Image (spheres, helix red, strand yellow):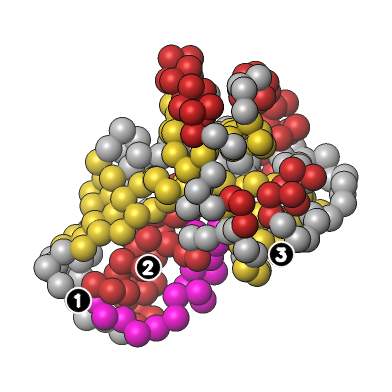
Amino acid sequence: MASASESAPAKINLALHVRERLADGYHRIETLFAFARDGDRLSVRPADTLSLSIEGPFAAGLSIGPDNLVLRAAAALRQTANVPESAALVLEKNLPVASGIGGGSADAAAALRLLRRFWGADVPLEPIARQLGADVPACLAGRTVRGEGRGDLLSAVPAGKLGGMPLLLVNPGVAMPTGPVFAAWDGVDRGLLAAGDPLQAARAGRNDLQAPAIEICPIVGELLGWLSAQPGTVLVRMSGSGATCFALFQREADCARAGEQARRRWPWSLETALA
């Protein structure tokens, strides 16, 4: 294969219930993952060494060394499959960093899918994904799933009305590292995430990290208020540990109007739809 590419779509948490702080520092959660049609993009071509270059609007400051999750995914796959070949990877970084929409995890998952094809590596990817991070298995699946445990114990759910639903992602221009937001969670278990139709379950649910994120970064609350005021929203919430927030719309026209206003008011936004 001379070259190939793979999409790394943005991840959103339709709901995120934090149930327990575990002894190992992680948290037991229940979440509904869904994915946008758009995001980062990873391409590959043959090379004598394994390398990564990053371009695009959010490339600045990102490491291209072995600590980058894309290269970690590539190295883990190469070792697991005993692949002698290398590859030159190029990441088009369109999603903001540390923003709660799974950019790094989505990129790592894209690397696993892409390089398995590129190298012809006949190995299961799920065990590798689980070693790389709690969100990587969901990003590897790339479809609506329920996550439990650390978020990496997945069960399929029918997308139902979510498929193709207009989606607006907005980031207030603030990087929000995951660790401090989880650390600021108050430790109160507010109950389980409902089963059944994912949209109904999400609307009846919550994101338990919203309150600590707003405490750390009040502009997240301002953004949520702004999104909630847009006509035609079906669900407004922060994704993951923030600071990106999202709105689902019933009609494309309402999403387009909100997207136009978001481009004038907020540093970054993406008008797209759920996959």
Q: Is residue 243 within the magenta segment?
A: no
Q: Which residue is mark 2?
A: 112
Q: Which residue is mark 3?
A: 149
Q: Which residues are magenta?
A: 119-139
Marker count (numbered): 3
Q: Is residue 192 above or below residue 46?
A: above
Q: Secondary structure at mark 1?
A: loop
Q: Quadrant of residue 7?
A: bottom left
Question: Can you give x and y, in whole percent of width and height, for residue 63 in the image?
Answer: 34, 46
Looking at the image, is mark 2 or mark 1 earlier in the sequence? 1
CA separation in Å, label 2 and label 1: 15 Å
Looking at the image, is mark 2 or mark 3 earlier in the sequence? 2
Q: Is residue 125 within the magenta segment?
A: yes
Q: Quadrant of residue 178?
A: top right
Question: Can you give x and y, in whole percent of width and height, for residue 233 in the image?
Answer: 63, 31
Q: Are marks 2 and 3 in contact (CB under 8 Å)?
A: no
Task: Name the residue: 41% across, 59% down.
Answer: 108
